[in-house]
Image (tube, rainbow, N blue to C red):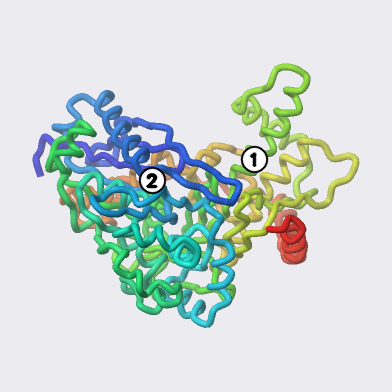
Amino acid sequence: MNAQRDIIIGIDAGTSVIKAVAFDLRGTQLGTSAVRNAYTMGADGSATQSLDRTWADCAEALRGLGDRIDGLAARCAAVAVTGQGDGTWLVGAGNRPASDAWLWLDARAAPTVQRLADGPMNRARFEATGTGLNTCQMGSQMAHMEAHVPDLLDRAEVALHCKDWLYLNLTGVRATDPSEASFTFGDFRNRDYSDTVIEALGLSHRRSLLPPILEGTQVTHPLTPDAAAQTGLLAGTPVSLGYVDMVMTALGAGVHTGDAGAACSTIGSTGVHMRAVRATDVHLNAEGTGYVICLPVPDLVTQVQTNMAATLNIDWALDMAADLVAEFGHRPSHADMVARIDQWMAQSKPGALVYHPYISEAGERGPFVRADARASLIGLNSTHRFADILRAVIEGLGMAARDCYAAMGDMPNELRLTGGAARSPALRRVLAAALNTPVRVSAREEAGAAGCAMMAAVAIGAYPDMDACIAEWTTPLLGQAESPDPGLVPTYDDLFTAYRDARQALAPTWATLRAAKGA
């Protein structure tokens, strides 16, 4: 490794924002460049994104990083890329897009998911992948395409995920990583494709669309001259293909630091709850839900349950209040509303209302999968005001996190938090009491970009293995543990019982509402 090359760039391509982040070889963040991405929602439940624009935005983010970091191109030892998970990014002849990407938000595959879930091979598929079927996944979406728009698959030569598409543009190599390959089409135990899984999805004759699987801590490919011209980096720079963004974020935030029983939750637009376990210790629930996603550590995987919507619920409540205020004149900004959350929490009584945070039009996927699941607020009376409703929404996120961890076994011994909402003292108090476990927040600002940059650091030999890298990049950034409020714990125990009983009882109502809409 060239001693003058002292920077690793991590690319984190989210649904709405693509970030390029520079780190030194010991994990210190040096600079960030971000570009807003865009996607289109349709009345038919579609959520699509332009492949070409996504690559152009990625290149722009890298050029912007070059403007912020002196000598970036010459100093760059490696580039790594992660991105939004699930979805289907079809590429055809000449490595050109075969269509716009179907994103993880896309709900069109709901009837196909139901058909496959009721099929005779679904449990065998789940036993291999450890992952429940939902509308987000490439397997479900490709099965739906096969049944309804097979010409999309006919035009394609390879089916990629977001980060894989960017890797193709950076290196010219069609590939995916062990994490997305195994939870979509494979077996988490051997990190390879599974004939059983592919057959269960009805896609055996489309197997040629599945790309080779690369381990980014061991294999890199050089940046192409064309990509170098577009990004401002040097041709030949090693590029590492990271794992899916969920586990990259968790890796950067501390899901695996050698402490038994630790877990990591990312509270962003969605809620991602995961714990690191040996592949032999995976707890597969009877309901067939959740994900098992490999970590870039031998024989280590994450058990994952994901809420379709987390802070989107808070945004909904705050936006509704702001809309009403705007009717009388000045509309408060979102930042103004967020700044008042702690004040509203102090004005309200814990555990007074039950809120189910199923605000997404795509329903819920963790710890149960229901495309027709919808948010609900239970227990209102004439004395309740906005502060009570907002508290219920925030407590609903705590209940949802507990619901997810309960589906994976015992509550964690310690919860590491990341995501924008982790900065909220109110939310941390709720989560600590809801799970009755200490909470620690990572000081890592860009955990997803850091996670994939750590893979590149191992790939180029800056560290002998991932555990050594974690010891310097992750563990020192974990903050002090915040203990649960002993007065809140029994209140939230009771609230959780009501929360779970009510969401089970509401399931027939969701189906009735969906039928009434003709969906």
Where residue 251 appears, as percent x and y from the top left, is 38, 52
Q: Residue furthest front?
A: 151
- Label 1 sits on residue: 314
Three-letter amino acid code at disc 1? Answer: Ile
Image quadrant where residue 346 sits = top right
Task: Answer few, some or many: residues within 10 Å of disc 1's Cα (few below 14, many 20 plus, some between 14 and 19).
Answer: many
Quarter containing the C terminus? bottom right
What's the residue at 76%, 41% (across, down)?
389
The tag on residue 448 is 2
Where residue 256 appears, as percent x and y from the top left, is 39, 57
What's the residue at 51%, 38% (across, down)?
420
What's the residue at 66%, 52% (across, down)?
358
Secondary structure under tag 2 reads: helix
What's the residue at 72%, 58% (across, down)?
518
Three-letter amino acid code at disc 2? Answer: Gly
**Of the pair 184 and 379, the residue shown nearer to us:** 184
